Amino acid sequence: MNRVSFIGAWVGAAVAVSVAAGCGNGGKQSLGFTDSAHATQAPAPAAGGNVASSRSDLLTTAVTVVNRGQTVGLTGTLAPDEETRVAARVSGIVQTFYVDRGSMVRKGDPLVQLDPTNARNSLAEGEASAEELRVKLGMKNENEPFDPKNMPDVKVVKAKLDLAERNYRRYKALDAGNAIAKSEFDRVSSELEAARSTYDQTVRQALETYQGYKTAMAKVVTLRQTLADTLIVAPFDGMVVEKLTSVGEWLEVMMGTGNVVRLVKVSPLRLKVTVPQQYVGQIRPGQVISFTVEGFPGETFHGRVNLISPALDTATRSLTVEALVDNADFKLRPGLFATARLDTGASSVAMFVPASALTHGGDVTRLFVVSGGVARQKIVTVGETTPQGTQIIAGLDKAERVILNPAGVSDGSAVN
């Protein structure tokens, strides 16, 4: 090096030292320092580092570590607890519809009325036949105990039998004293046997009539039920989602054309979610699942796990779990998409970093940490975003310091 070059280099170095010494605390900001509790200036590069590529404007922060109960983020769908095609029990013409699509009904509410004319007429005929037999049997009402001796026809033949028995006893005494001809005694004996036969036959007929009366009354009960069945009612609380017939259409039950509406049970609802395989061992019946739906922003709903699938889906390696959700006010509807969280009951350590520390490229998320005075790139797996920052599930150590403003930083860049 010649003399002129040496003097120029010495003067430049002296000026640089003088400027650095005169900056004091007021120069910290220009050199990239901060007084933040967490964000600090990156440490100076190690001896022998590349001074020409070093960065003095980088801010770093410690990883936020939180101890919390472990929850699993899930997605699912609300499904009805039950679904059925409500059918008529008897054939007939649809006369009236009491509901429409979307109608909410309670158990026992009327859905459809079939024309009751034929059923009403058949019932009247059956009741008349039963009443005729009751009168014939001499019963005051259908609940009176039946005794064939009280039947009018039986009483008549019983009187004749009693008379024949008295005549027989008198003629038998006369025959013993040879006071009458043998033929007269034989005639009286024959009359007694005929009276007994007539009595027995009349009692049997009375019993047959009573059995016919009971059959007629059973038929009346059936006819009453048939008339009642012309009104089709809801078998449970639910929502009508489809009408399967129209007014004036003939329903033929025996031909399988008796369906009138499709009804879904919406209280309770079933929340069906899929749980990743790494959380399978932490799922238990009775655990609470909290969830939200887009239709009700700001509201949180809850359900309890009541069904856990016995096997994982081989394609997704996930487990189907169902939770019962009370919906007594019919607020929620089947088919709604739900964003859910499952409290596993376990505790875990969660790491969070500011979102500004992350860079994204395709499906890969990266951040930079300061290690030994240089920036080191790390590929991380991220989770949820909360007021504490973005959760880092994997790829980062909780003791590391993260660069907050990684724009322009590359792996191995010296920082100061």
Image (cartoon, grey):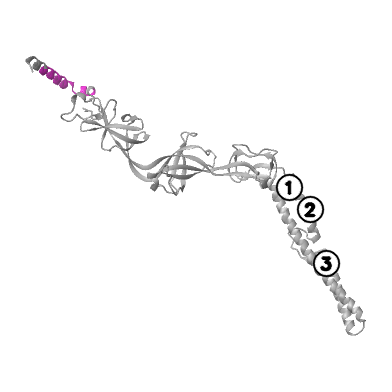
Quarter occupied by the C terminus: top left
Q: Name the residue at the bottom extreme.
A: 177
Disc 1/disc 2 C-alpha distance (Å)? 14 Å
Q: Residue at x 39, y 41 (%)?
A: 72
The residue mark sitting in front, 3 or 1, is 1
Please tell me which residue is depicted at 76% across the width and 53% down the height of the picture: 127
- Residues marked 3 and 1 touching at CB (< 8 Å): no
Inspect the image, locate mark 2, and give the three-letter code of the amino acid beneath it: Ala
- In the image, residue 33 lies at what x, y percent? 23, 26
- Give the secondary structure at mark 1: helix
N-term mark: 2 or 3: 2
Marks 3 and 1, Cα distance to the nearest angstrom? 39 Å
**Local SS, label 2:** helix
Residue 24 magenta-drawn?
A: yes
Residue 155's disc number: 3
Would you say the magenta stretch is mainly helix, strand or loop?
A: helix
Residue 145 in the image: state x and y as whole percent.
Answer: 74, 63
Q: Which residues are magenta?
A: 9-29
Crowding at mark 3 (Cα within 10 Å: few <14, some 14-19, many 20+): some
Percent across and percent down for residue 97 are 66, 39
* For residue 257, side relative to residue 57 (left or right): right
Q: Residue 367: say if magenta.
A: no
The mark found on residue 128 in the picture is: 2
